[in-house]
Structures are given as C-alpha cells and as structure tokens.
Image: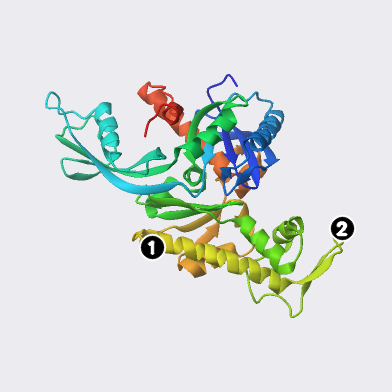
Amino acid sequence: MASSNLMVGLEIGTSKICVVVGEGKPDGTIKILGVGQAPSRGVRKGEIVDFETAMKCVHEAVVDAEEKSDIMIRSVYIGITGAHIQSFNNRGCVRVSEDHEEIDEQDIEDVKINAREVSIPAPNAFLHSIIQHYHVDGQDGVLNPIGMLGQKLEADFHIIHGVRTRIQNTIRCVKELPLDVEDVVFTPFAAAQVVLTQHQKNLGALVIDVGGGTTDYVLYVDGAVKQSGVLAVGGDHITNDISMGLRIPMTRAEKLKVEEGSTVLGNCLPGETVLLKDDSGFAGKEVERETLNTIIHMRLRETFELLKRRLEDEPFLDYLGEGIFITGGCSQLNGIDHLAEDVFGIPARASHARTMSGLTSAFENPQFSAAIGLIKYAQAVQGDRQQRGRFGRFIGKFFNGMR
C-alpha cells in the first residue's frame, strides 16, 4: 500500500465488518478496488463487547479485502457509531492579533479551540468539530476567512463527542492486528459524503443510515451539519420482532425479512402466505405475509417516530429542500422510503453511494455507503493536508489525555 492515493475504509458494524479499498484519482474521483466482508461477532449496537472475537472478525474482513484488491493493507480510516455519541452546535470567537489584522491558519485553529471550551461529560472525548459558518467583524456567510482583514473572527461548529474508552476500544481492536489508524470518523457523516452531493447539502437533506444495531443520522442545512446522532435500534430489532412474533429461529427470521419482507401494509391478497421450508432442527412453517409486513412496519415506524421526536428539538426539519436519503443495509426493505415520507411528511428516497469507477456492485449496495464514505472523507483530508503542508496525526489525542 505504498501509493498515497490508496485509502481503506473500515466499518465495524453490528451485522457485518466491511473493508473497502479505494484509489483516489487526480480529478477527485474514486475507483473502488475491492471490498472485504466478514460476519460481525463480538459487536452489539455498533460497539465492541467481545474484544478478541471482534478482532478476529476484523482480521477476516481485512484479509478478504486484501485478496479482492490485491493490495497489502497497512492503515485504515475507521467508522465510529454507538448510542454514546452526542453532538451540539457552538460558536467560537477570537480577537485577531493587533500586529497583523490578516486572518491566518492559527486564527482558524484558535477559534476551533475556543468553540470547544464547553463542558462535556468527563469520560468523553471530542470526535469532530465540523465547521458550519465563519463570521468576520460581523460579516456573515464567510466561506474561507484566511487572508481577509478583520479584528474579530467567529465560527459556528457542529461538535461531535463520545465516550473515550469506547472509541479507544475500536482503535485498539484495529491496532492489535497490527494496522495503523489514520482517523476515526462518525459513521453517518462518512456516509453523507458519498450519498449526498454538495448541492443537496446546500438545499438541505437528512441522511438516515439504518444498520443492524443502530440507526445513525446527519442533517444538513445550507451546506452545514446541524444535527447528528445515533438511535440504538436497527435491523436486528426487526429480526428479533419477527422471530418472537412468528416463533421462528433468528436465522430464519433474518432470511424472511431480507427475502420476503416489506413495510407496505394492505397490498397482500387475503390469506396470502409465505412458506418456510423445513431445515435441520426446523420443521418448516407457513406464515401470513400481512403479519410479517405488519411486524416490520410497526418497528420501523417506531424507529422513525423516535428519530423525528429527537430532530424536532431543533427547527431544521422545516428546511430540508432535498428531503430524506435512507441508506444502510435496511434501506433495501421494500417501501421504507414511503414509510419515512408518511412519518416525517417530507419526500424520502432509498439511496446509495454516487456513481464511481471500479466495482459497480460495491457503490450500488447501500450496505457499503459508510465504508465508501470513509474513503471519500480520507481523500478530502489528504487533499487538505497537502494544501496546508501539514501531516499531523489525529489519532494520538485519544491516548494522550486530550479531553
């Protein structure tokens, strides 16, 4: 993995471990070289609960990705999720030195530090400070203040933080393999980089990533992240509901959900059934299709209603000109977009990563949106580092006592 244009995204999900190898092109596009997968064990609701088991699963996925891409992986960008992740918006303010009224990079760094001068829970660490807007001497809507003249620089940030030890456990799981960790990225923020265009971010959009153990979200208004977070409920909860409601094993419930499930009610013929064939240890069963769909519909409706209530704490739902984009493994459930529209009262669509070169099956599969998004994030970070001429490592802050 000698080329600096090669990047690897690693998502440790509740249902699967996904590793995507990509190559950044000079024109800013990305070519997907290979995708590695492994069933996820030792992970619950997006967080590691069995370190050794999870590490073995990550290793399996990495080896699979190496074989598929013919690349030796040495470093990765990791997606982070979990109900411990929290966020808020805050403004930083600094006075520009009287020696020079021209705003420079140090002023940018200082205003970011100032925005973080807030109390967060003692066990937590900052994950992201995502710039929303700059203000120079009261002038709003400044996109890049470097080089401008001014006496006061203000900046609005969306700040994401989470429990330090839980983030560290994910990092350690990867470093033990051993692999270098280039950066850790909030999973839905990564997914949004390939699900949304800049134009869609500008017009306002909500990305909902429905995974196995969590439902992650990030909301953009005027091109800036305004809200983000995690609900500790996902596709596995639907599977569990099916298993309990129909009294069938979890493995059969998952297969039934994926192959026959729908969120749409009232579309079945009266008495229409689905036949579950007998298998070793399972006698087989006939289930009513409408009953199956009702179970799926009710759980997903509850999830969307929970999310809507959380988002309504702020006024931004009224400014989503582009509507809702649903991605992740569960976004493939039939009718999920219509259910979201019904709950939120906003146009919604199931979505995946935008067109890239390389493996078509990868970017067209919404399960891979976050992992591919990690590569897009990496490309942006590397381009920024080259522009600034700085190559400082991010990851040390989680081990060096930074709050």
Local secondary structure at mark 2: loop
Residue found farthest to the bottom: 270
Local secondary structure at mark 1: loop
Q: Are marks 2 and 1 in contact (CB under 8 Å)?
A: no
How crowded pointer 1 is (Cα within 10 Å; few <14, some 14-19, many 20+) is rated as few
Residue position for label 1:
312
Instruction: Where is residue 33? Give x, y as percent.
Output: 64, 32
Instruction: Where is residue 334? Give x, y as percent.
Output: 64, 63
Q: Given the image, on which type of amino acid does mark 1 rest? A: Glu
Against 178, residue 293 (above or below) is below
Residue in the picture at 67% in, 37% down: 53
Q: Given the image, on which type of amino acid does mark 2 rest? A: Asp
- In the image, which disc is placed on residue 279? 2
**Quarter the C terminus occupies:** top left
Q: Nearer the viewer, residue 362 or 288?
A: 288
Q: In this rendering, does residue 220 appear at all?
A: yes
Q: Nearer the viewer, residue 356 or 60?
A: 60
Determine the CA span between mark 2 and mark 1: 47 Å
Instruction: Give whichever of discs 2 and 1 has the lower sequence position.
Output: 2
Instruction: Where is residue 83? Give x, y as percent.
Output: 49, 50
Against 157, residue 77 (above or below) is above
Residue in the picture at 15% in, 27% down: 97
Q: How is the image coloured?
A: rainbow
How crowded pointer 2 is (Cα within 10 Å; few <14, some 14-19, many 20+) is rated as few
Residue 164 shown left or right of residue 288 in the figure: left
Residue found farthest to the left: 98
**Quarter the N terminus occupies:** top right
Residue 90 shown left or right of residue 126 in the figure: left
